[in-house]
Amino acid sequence: MYKQSVQLIVDKCIGCTNCIKRCPTEAIRVQNGKALIISDRCLDCGECIRVCQSNAKIAVSDPMAIIDDFDYKIAIPAPSLYGIADSSVSTDRILTGLKHLGFDDVFEVATAAEIITKRTNEFLLNNEGNGPFISSSCPAVVRLVQVSFPSLIGQIIPFISPMELAARLAKERAGNDKGKVGVFFISPCAAKFSEIRNPHRQEKSRVDGVIGIKDIQVKLQRLIRSDMETEKLASASGVGIGWGRIDGEARALASDGVISVDGISNTISLLEELENGKINQFRFIELMACPGGCVGGPMTLVNPYVAKSRIMDRWDTAGAVVCEDCGPLQDISWTEELQASSFMKLDDDYEKAMLMMQRLDLIEKTLPGIDCGSCGAPTCHSFAEDIVRGRAVVTSCIFVLRKKIRQLTEEMIKLEDVLPYRLDKDE
Amino acid sequence: MEFHFDVCGEDYSLAGSASSMIKKKLNQLGLPPLIVRKTAIVMYEAEINMVIHAGGGVVDVHINPDDIRIILKDEGPGIPDIDRAMEAGYSTASDKARELGFGAGMGLPNIRKNSDDLRIESKVGEGTTVTIMVKLK
């Protein structure tokens, strides 16, 4: 079972309908006045975090103190971290500041991204004509395909994420003489906490902790402005840095036939058309659940489009060369096949599922169809589905309830009418 | 189980909504992804054909224990030469449809490729009925 990173702060939740209405997989229900996430359906896209007006949704990450459990501490920052400052502040300086927060070494995920760009080009060449292929770098998109578009699973490029590769390379660089080595992802993303628990490979993730950019940014910016001496730490070119924003990964391939889409609802529309066989002219499809790409992740503080423009400036200044000397060729393939999530299935038995669907249809016809959300489900259809799955009762619908009360009242009045006149003492 | 859809002829932006709905139903029934994909493609192509050539019509989808049958009926201009229409690359789509990226002449060939049976009955001036079958096993 999937364990999502997005969690509810129960005390803050007022049981409104904002998150249930905006969740792209209808994974949230309000029950007993609190928003409950159905884990099997959750993508960790972070949409509910963005829309919650009570700030009751958070993406779980590790506190900075987690690094104290290790002897040798390595930070691996996402490329989107470079969006916290404009390009007059060098990536060397940002990385030096990061190191000063308490790390012994830093290793850029952007460098690992360049290796993945290289390997993706090989993959596309070897599989020419079988595409289009979907990037696996956004974990929420991979989950979305598993959950809502199972027929497209075979079109996802089965590569580990740049984060995972960076962790591996960083640990190799640290060697064996440093005691207990810990690698910490500096993350814009809500889904990474889950990804390191389910890395699509049989071996365990090499990442030991996920620290949100928002939790370190203020301190980091103070260090950047201080008189700290800048170390030479950066190695990534514009190609790797560009991954921090939408279109970066696709452009890095320097190939024809690429398309990039950001935002979860745009992503869903594109996958819908891809499944209809309508979008076959592309070789490579970059899909990012967050607006603007990773810079728009829920664990960032800078406006996504400001950060995106900063990343683009850096792309221009850092040059667009895919790393020539990326170290020894690594096996970056998944070792586990991606499984379709079966949450949509009404029942394992086809005939039973059919009966349930017929019942669902009948129930839906008795509902008002205005998708008000008062029952706690996002739509009348999903409410009807909850009923046939045994998770809800029809009188949770206030319209059905009102009708029932009216019927009951009318019956009572009728009953009252037939009382013998003489028995009524007041008259 | 049966589902009925009215397909509006003028609105290109709505084309494909019936096939999306059926795709969701098939996923809910737990049908294998390949069957879902094939059905989605044939239904989408057939729906689009109806919009661009016949000005809309009605679609009835029957989900049976062993197969899915999709019946599309329209009262459009009809197809004068069905064999010709089945040829890859042949299309009589309007300029407007082509401007919108339709009319590549791959609709019917795609439907044939992704279905287990395809029947077309058409009378010029009266309309067309397309019956498509996808086997479940």
Image (spheres, rainbow, N blue to C red):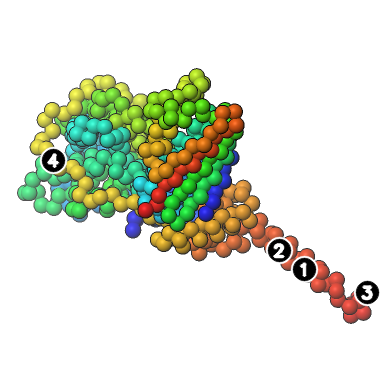
The residue where tag 4 is placed is A330
The residue where tag 1 is placed is A411
Label whose residue precedes the other's in the sequence (4 or 3): 4
Number of numbered markers: 4
Q: Are marks 2 and 4 on the same chain?
A: yes
Q: Is residue A302 left or right of residue A388?
A: left
Q: Is residue A84 left or right of residue B125?
A: left
Q: Compared with residue A401, is residue A155 higher up or lower down, i.e. above or below?
A: above
The residue where tag 2 is placed is A405
Q: Is residue A314 left or right of residue A182?
A: right
> Quick one: A335 or A44, which is closer to the camera?
A335
Q: Are marks 1 and 3 on the same chain?
A: yes
Q: Are marks 4 and 1 on the same chain?
A: yes
At 47% from the left and 21% from the top, the residue drawn is: B99
Mark toward the viewer: 1 or 3 = 1
* Res. A415 in view: yes
Mark toward the viewer: 4 or 1 = 1
Rounded to the nearest angstrom, the CA distance separating label 3 from label 2 is 28 Å
> Quick one: A156 or A280, which is closer to the camera?
A280
Q: Position of residue A378 (x, y in %)?
A: 53, 50
Classify mark 2: helix, strand or loop.
helix
Rounded to the nearest angstrom, the CA distance separating label 1 from label 2 is 10 Å
Rounded to the nearest angstrom, the CA distance separating label 4 from label 1 is 76 Å
Given the image, on which type of amino acid does mark 4 rest? Gln
